[in-house]
């Protein structure tokens, strides 16, 4: 066992910190959202800067512009970016999709897509959920019928994160419509060019009042055959894999992101007087911060454990689902506690150093309402933990 | 012992529910959240015509003489409908305070207009460095000659931007005193604060506002006692609103669980969803019992510091749990602006912090326990 | 609405308090367990004294020795007895079974049993669960085959509370063994005389190291036909009703019982110094006591709400199950908090005024491990709440 | 970064598991709970023969020179087996403290005997009015002439009734000092305290026990620093035991959920039971990561106040949740003395309170956060 980092890893961490110091994330314009990883902020400019550093393709083979760095280095990168709250929402998801491209795509497609993804020019979005196919993804109805040199796609996707800012959809669609064929052998995976005729991206206004997700309507869209990823009708395997990766990678930065906020809250409490005493001496506020510290760090270690398994190439069964449940439960409690610590002062409008903390806390709190649903519900994830992880019977 | 509603209360509840279904669709609630005023004056007028702004006021002041308990039944429906606007401020913080400690003159000049829906009232208490404890207030009413001059900043004053009168709790030599301040007085500056749901809270700056002794509400230096009673009424009123919201969340969630199909079955047939609903049901029943008992005690004028704080502490936490589960059951769809679920999620967090958080009321419970 | 009590009710409460002052419960010898309602203490002497006061038959018709008092008076009695922690474990359960006797028994049986139950001479125990029929009660295997003038009973029951101290079992057994007959139409209810040949009561040692439950073995036991309660093969309705009543009545005293302990903890905290400060000023101890106060009182009001419905004769659907879940969740948390407040000092052995509190707290804490299972698991109770209470579909 | 066990650690774990399966059936554990001594000396001897009492001691003192981290792997299996007896006291509280601060003479005279299983050690810290804070200790070592005289009462001293030496933390002029007290000295009185599980704790009264400077452990007045390090090791050791217990609870519960049938299906096929198991799994994984990281940091001699307290706070709470769910899944059957589940439920509550409760470690976390 070894819970430390090598000198090389520490140096890499320092390199990232120096970069972030030279390029303060809050100085970059955003195309959506405000401050923060995983909470809706996205900046082309920032992501392209990451691309120019080669950090978007850190682990890829050299032949596709990558650096063949180990996964641990990527995890370190994610932690540092999270702690700095960089405007790279959905970054990890995009990263996990690009990995599938590496796995599945033809050499031609790799050459076509990977340079753009690696430089931050090309963004991918996940076109998976449908109005009547949420947890039950196999109920999806979007069809892609082979026709001449293309697939003719008709249907509707929802909850496509940042589709309005991205370029290519990571599209799952039904390529076999014969009801006698089992559903798991009837779905394929495509790269969907947003600019194709018949594609309509319709941004969805969220409960926060802004736009993060879109609905995607496909009306007789003709996707050239070469944009099929992997084998026809074998999409369900990739679907499962994508979901599992999404669960882990999209949440790996979360504990570190929360830790930064906790540290801000501690500082806030040390500088804030209420009813005659420092908030940092208020027993309830202390209790809420301590409980958060314990849960966040435990969550972080659980994620590192999974990350280490990935780095070692160990097989995963329940781990990504478990990590998702852990992170989402933790987040729900943490941001509730954050609102309790701020109390009515969460609604203050004062141009002081804590104004962003207050505004962000209100925003993060609302985001958490959706967290346990993203990447599959926590109920389904717990089922997976019990069956795939612990071997409990499905029936 | 009687946990049931009276016939009149049942009727009031039904009238209110029908009224809001007709007059206040949730789409309007969401529009109003963007409106600077935050509520529709026409609706206010209709509510006054129904006798609601005067419901709890004596008949001699143009009211209907109903009890505070009756009022909370109405507030439950307002919470269920997500009614924005200054009803709680005007009636609970304003009119009931004047009824409680105002002079006959103040009652006569203000209350009938409240009953007719012509006045909006509110109360200013919290400050940048003091929220629950008057001994740390910085807003001061200086006695100079025949005048009082109020200076300082109050925070989180609900609906001050549309109020005609603001009751201000200010330091005086020897304690805290309440004053009834005309919101149009020179030196009153009002700024809207950011909102989570449709609520409207303001920062109100008093810049040497001149008052006379006639503007004093109740006796000099008795403000701390008055504030305690005001907080009891306000906390219970907020509980009632939250209870109404929680009832709606329960109904919506059960309905959705029956309707939504996944893997070939309604999701409400899965044990995980069933147990979420069961947990919500217990939280809801707890909210109802605790809120109504506290309301009854306030209504009867019984000592109720413990019961009010127990209720607010429970309701604050239970409504958070319930609205989280409501989102969990609805899944992603409730994350959309178009959906109604999030209105209640937002109301719950605002309500938890209003008129004493669970933490504050927990401290009251500790003291009442003898700790 | 009215959350107060009438002057008559207040006088009744005072009468009970005076009685308990004159007859301090802790002075009575116990046949099992120590101090406390619902936690295993039972004293014949005390229960018979209650009987002699007519309080065991408070609500019964006068013709059977009852006083025809309203249910509210009984609830007040239960609260006061609970707060005084009288040695009447399983009292409420016995009371609820006697109610079924009133409902179902022949006039002859009523005359035979009720006087003894009312005086505290006759104790009933519930013979319901079996090793392979816990939550799934309809899976019970004990048979009662009609034969001449009796039913021939064979089988085994478990978790029969206080059977070793009681006289008659409230026995559910299968009277129809044809597998084609649905299970719900194959079970009957009997009064089982413990002294009949073939009945063996085998006390079970609990995780606390003492005896509260027994196994009951029935080997060719001949129960005279007249001990059939209600109609043959109609026992399932009574089973459900018994369970529902058990859930409510057995737990009604619990919040008040916990409140007494909370008040003791408060006093303890006010008199105990640790690490230089009064425990009552320790933020965590305060927090734990406050959270308990909120939950206990809410639980109490929820029970009163159900009690009021019973008093009004309103129909119950989910309420008893809901109250059970509420009380058991509350209790689990409360006694965990109690142990946290005492901390290592829970294990002190000092002949001071807090010695019983410490010893009892250790005991209560262990009891809670079984609470959510008693009266049917909390899982089944939540199912009932969701289906019977909220109308969610079973399938 | 390496979350895995080394080959040697895997082997140690397996050896220990096999050993306890063979030598310590749970029926014996329950019998020992009634035994005044509380553990079987023959088993102790066998464990010593396996090199476990000296596992973590340097070879020069007859040990195997393994790391503290290795030791915690062994402790995990001890917790899983519910091993009663003075292993943690002797090795972690006693021997490691002597290794840490003892003189060469003390090491030479004590440690080899520990390695051979011939000595039982323990440490006395808590008192009637002070548990975590040495500045409120009342037990005092008075310096009179060439002697120290110790007077006062220590509480919750693990295994003192069978200890050969007791390390005592006593007030001295200017701080806290540790002393190594022969348990057979005149004036040492030991009384067994009530137990929840098979643990043995004592009240130890020191009635003018005479010591010399040679009995001092480490430097005078440095005891508070030493105690901090001792508490780190002890808290992590307790976490490791609890982790082992939690692993066993997880396995037992899953197995029971697979085997037990209700309504015609294994109960483990019901979503409610599945989700209980899933929640246990996350708690367990958290326990493992946090315990092993803290153990590694202690082992490496890194500053670890924060990590140890985070671990103990998490493990204390998580093991409570897990054992409650374990009982929930097992249903009534686990309430029987014959069943094993309750051993872990009891161990969890004892463990939570040992070497700093979640509350105490929470306060450490608060301080480390800068609060």
Image: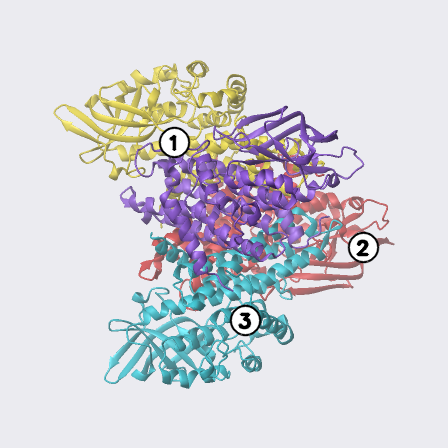
Chain colours: A purple, B yellow, C red, D cyan
Which dot, 2 or 3, sits closer to the camera? Answer: 3
Judging depth in this view, the residue of D70 and C346 nearest the camera is D70
Could you tell me if residue D91 is visible in this image?
yes
Please name the residue shown 49% across and 69% down the image.
D69
Please name the residue shown 65% across and 75% down the image.
D22
Furthest-right residue in this view: C148
Which dot, 1 or 3, sits closer to the camera? Answer: 3
The residue carrying pointer 3 sits among few (fewer than 14), some (14 to 19) or many (20 or more) residues within 10 Å by Cα, namely many
Asked if marks 2 and 3 touch (Cβ < 8 Å), the reply is no
Q: How far apart are marks 2 and 3 (CA)?
A: 51 Å
Q: Position of residue A359 (x, y in %)?
A: 39, 35
Judging depth in this view, the residue of C319 and A122 nearest the camera is A122
Q: Where is residue B145 in the image (x, y as percent from the top left)?
A: 12, 25
Judging depth in this view, the residue of A360 and D336 nearest the camera is A360
Residue C72 placement, left or right of C243: left
Q: Please give the label number shown on residue C210.
A: none
Q: What element carries label 3?
A: helix
The residue carrying pointer 2 sits among few (fewer than 14), some (14 to 19) or many (20 or more) residues within 10 Å by Cα, namely many
Which dot, 2 or 1, sits closer to the camera? Answer: 1
Do pointers 1 and 3 mark residues of a single chain?
no
Q: Mark 2 points at which residue?
A: C143
Q: Provide the chain ID for the residue under circle 2.
A: C
Q: Please give the label number shown on residue D74.
A: 3
Residue A242 placement, left or right of B2: right
Q: Position of residue D222 (x, y in %)?
A: 30, 72
Q: Mark 1 points at which residue?
A: B233
């Amino acid at each position: 066992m070894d819970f430390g980092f090598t000198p090389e890893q520490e140096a890499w961490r320092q390199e990232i910190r120096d970069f972030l110091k030279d390029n303060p994330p809050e100085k970059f314009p955003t195309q959506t959202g405000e401050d923060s990883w995983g909470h809706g902020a996205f900046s082309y400019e920032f992501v392209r800067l990451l691309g120019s550093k080669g950090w978007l393709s850190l682990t890829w083979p050299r032949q596709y512009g990558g650096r063949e760095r180990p996964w641990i280095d990527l995890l370190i990168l994610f932690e540092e970016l999270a702690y700095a709250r960089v405007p790279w929402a959905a970054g990890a998801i995009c990263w996990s999709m690009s990995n599938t491209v590496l796995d599945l795509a033809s050499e031609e497609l790799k050459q076509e897509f990977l340079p753009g993804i690696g430089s931050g020019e090309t963004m991918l979005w996940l076109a998976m959920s449908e109005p009547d196919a949420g947890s039950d993804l196999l109920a999806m109805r979007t069809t892609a019928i082979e026709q001449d040199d293309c697939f003719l796609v008709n249907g509707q996707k929802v909850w496509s994160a940042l589709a309005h800012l991205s370029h290519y959809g990571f599209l799952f669609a039904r390529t076999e419509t014969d009801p006698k064929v089992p559903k798991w052998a009837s779905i394929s995976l495509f790269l969907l060019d947003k600019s194709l005729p018949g594609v309509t991206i319709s941004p969805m206004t969220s409960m926060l009042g802004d736009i993060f997700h879109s609905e995607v309507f496909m009306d007789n869209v003709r996707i050239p055959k070469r944009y099929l990823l992997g084998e026809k009708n074998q999409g369900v395997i990739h679907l499962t894999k994508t979901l599992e990766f999404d669960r882990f990678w999209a949440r790996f930065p979360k504990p570190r992101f929360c830790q930064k906020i906790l540290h801000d809250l501690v500082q806030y409490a040390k500088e804030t007087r209420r009813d005659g005493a420092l908030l940092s001496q208020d027993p309830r506020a202390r209790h809420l911060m301590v409980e958060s510290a314990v849960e966040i760090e435990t969550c972080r270690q659980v994620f590192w454990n999974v990350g280490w398994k990935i780095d070692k190439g160990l097989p995963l069964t329940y781990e990504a689902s478990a990590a998702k449940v852990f992170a989402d439960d933790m987040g729900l409690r943490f941001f509730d506690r954050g609102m309790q610590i701020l109390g009515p002062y969460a609604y203050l409008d004062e141009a002081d150093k804590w104004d962003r903390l207050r505004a962000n806390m209100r925003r993060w709190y609302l985001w958490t309402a959706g967290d346990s649903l993203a990447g599959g519900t926590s109920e389904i994830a717990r089922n997976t933990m019990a069956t795939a992880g612990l071997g409990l019977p499905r029936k | 012992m009687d946990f049931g509603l009276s016939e009149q209360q049942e009727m009031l509840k039904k009238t209110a529910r029908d009224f809001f279904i007709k007059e206040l669709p949730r789409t309007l609630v969401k529009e109003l959240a963007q409106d600077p005023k935050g509520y529709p004056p026409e609706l206010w007028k209709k509510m006054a015509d129904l006798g609601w702004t005067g419901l709890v006021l004596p008949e001699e002041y143009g009211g209907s003489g109903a009890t505070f308990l009756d009022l909370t039944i109405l507030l439950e429906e307002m919470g269920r409908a997500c009614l924005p606007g200054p009803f709680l401020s005007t009636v609970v913080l304003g009119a009931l305070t004047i009824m409680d400690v105002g002079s006959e003159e103040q009652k006569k000049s203000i209350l009938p207009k409240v009953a007719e829906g012509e006045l909006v009232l509110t109360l200013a208490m919290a400050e940048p460095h003091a929220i629950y404890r008057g001994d740390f207030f910085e807003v001061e009413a200086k006695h100079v000659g025949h005048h009082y001059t109020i200076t300082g900043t109050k925070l989180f004053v609900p609906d001050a931007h549309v109020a005609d009168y603001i009751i201000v709790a200010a330091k005086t030599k020897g304690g805290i005193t309440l004053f009834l301040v005309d919101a149009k007085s020179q030196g009153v500056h009002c700024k809207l604060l950011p909102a989570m749901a449709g609520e409207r809270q303001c920062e109100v700056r008093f810049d040497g506002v001149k008052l006379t002794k006639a503007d004093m509400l109740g006796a000099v230096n008795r403000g701390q006692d008055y504030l305690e009673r005001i907080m009891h009424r306000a906390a219970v009123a907020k509980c009632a609103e939250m209870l109404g919201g929680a009832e709606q969340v329960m109904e919506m969630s059960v309905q959705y669980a029956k309707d939504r199909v996944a893997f070939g079955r309604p999701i409400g047939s899965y044990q995980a969803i069933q147990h979420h609903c069961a947990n919500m049901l217990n939280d809801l029943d707890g909210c109802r019992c605790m809120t109504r008992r506290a309301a009854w005690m306030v209504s009867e004028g019984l000592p109720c510091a413990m019961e009010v704080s127990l209720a607010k502490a429970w309701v604050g936490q239970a409504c958070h749990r319930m609205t989280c589960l409501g989102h969990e059951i609805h899944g992603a769809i409730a994350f959309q602006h178009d959906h109604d679920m999030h209105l209640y999620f937002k109301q719950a967090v605002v309500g938890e912090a209003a008129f004493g958080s669970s933490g504050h009321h927990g401290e009251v419970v500790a003291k009442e326990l003898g700790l």
